[in-house]
């Protein structure tokens, strides 16, 4: 029998891996991947709790909304990364220090 | 141990293991392709929570859209991609910085302690729904119910999120366009 706790522990693991990626990596694309991992962990939580809510289906509906939000954030984030690369010739966030030209 | 539990553990191990590899590989191209496996096994985990539509959406949106976009961005923003791929000599894994490992593990411990406390008294609505049998069963018609909910109870968030998606996509297209000569 798979209980709620199984899902929660797995999503806690994925969330912490994402947190580590966001803090440690020196590459904007890897940081975006870390954010995606954290969003995926949150979606897993939504979906796991939704199993016990048949009248509203709130968890599954908002999991779908979260997927849409993640897709939108990736589209805008990658556009910004490409612009930053065109301007600075690097995507290491540590090297991008100037606000203006 | 029956088949369901075994498959759940297999998917969980696959997800966590490939996520760990994603963050520890030095080569970004390899990490991006490993990210595929993480997302696939996360979709498999959604199936065990009886959310079939969310799992299919995850595969379609993430694997079909987000990852392709990421690979494009990586190829456009990395001059040394080919050199990176050929240069396998040296260390295969990048060394973790110990501060961030410490922070991540500490956060994980905090979550686990909270989970242990939380298990002692589950929320009222979960207990009452279990008692009254109001939980999703494997032979329920999920997708039809979801469609009805989207068009009745959650119609305002649905419309807001569609406008938001339109705005974000227009913004992304505007941002990544080539600048004209000024």
Image (cartoon, coloured by chain):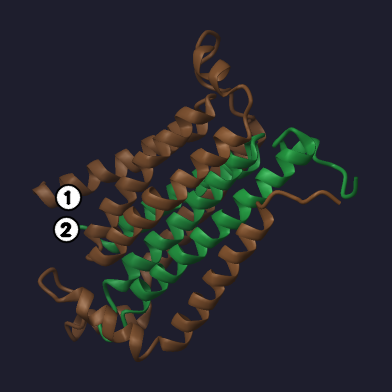
Q: Residue at x 56, y 55 (%)?
A: A75
Asked if disc 2 and disc 1 are in contact, CB closer than 8 Å, the reply is yes
Q: Residue furthest right?
A: A101
Q: Residue furthest bottom?
A: B152
Position of A46 compared to A1: left or right? right
User: Can you tell which chain is drawn green?
Assistant: A
Percent position of residue B21, x then y: 44, 31
* Residue at image mark 1: B5
Percent position of residue A58, x then y: 36, 79
Position of A32 compared to A42: left or right? right
Res. B123 in view: yes
* Residue at image mark 2: A1
Task: Please state which of residues B165 and A37 is positioned toward the viewer in this rendering.
Answer: B165
What crowding class fits label 2: few (fewer than 14 Cα within 10 Å), some (14-19), or many (20 or more)?
Answer: few
Alpha-carbon distance for marks 2 and 1? 7 Å
- Residue B149: image quadrant is bottom left
Task: Please state which of residues B147 and B117 is positioned toward the viewer in this rendering.
Answer: B147
Q: Secondary structure at mark 1?
A: helix
Q: Is residue B24 above or below residue B120?
A: above
- Residue A67: image quadrant is bottom left
Percent position of residue A89, x then y: 75, 33
């Amino acid at each position: 029998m798979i209980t709620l706790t199984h899902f929660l522990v797995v999503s806690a693991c994925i969330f912490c891996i994402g947190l580590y990626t966001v803090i440690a990596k020196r590459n904007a694309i890897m940081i975006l991947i870390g954010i995606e991992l954290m969003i995926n962990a949150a979606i897993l939580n939504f979906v796991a709790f939704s199993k016990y809510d048949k009248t509203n289906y709130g968890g599954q509906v908002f999991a779908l909304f979260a997927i849409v939000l993640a897709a939108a954030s990736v589209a805008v984030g990658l556009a910004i990364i490409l612009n930053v690369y065109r301007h600075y010739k690097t995507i290491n966030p540590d090297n991008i220090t100037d606000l203006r030209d | 141990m029956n088949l369901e539990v075994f498959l759940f553990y297999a998917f969980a191990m696959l997800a966590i293991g490939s996520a760990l590899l994603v963050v520890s590989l030095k080569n970004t191209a390899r990490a991006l392709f490993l990210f595929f496996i993480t997302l696939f096994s996360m979709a498999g985990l959604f199936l065990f929570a009886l959310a079939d539509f969310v799992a299919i959406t995850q595969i379609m949106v993430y694997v079909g859209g987000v990852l392709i976009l990421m690979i494009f961005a990586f190829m456009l923003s990395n001059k040394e991609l080919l050199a990176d791929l050929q240069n396998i000599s040296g260390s295969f894994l990048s060394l973790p910085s110990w501060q961030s490992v410490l922070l991540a593990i500490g956060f994980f411990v905090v979550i686990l302690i909270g989970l242990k406390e939380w298990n002692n008294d589950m929320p009222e609505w979960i207990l009452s729904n279990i008692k009254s049998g109001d939980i999703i069963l494997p032979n329920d018609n999920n997708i039809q119910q979801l469609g009805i909910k989207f068009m009745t109870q959650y119609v305002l968030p649905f419309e807001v999120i569609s406008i938001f998606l339109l705005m974000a996509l227009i913004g992304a297209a505007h941002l990544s366009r080539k600048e004209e000569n000024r």
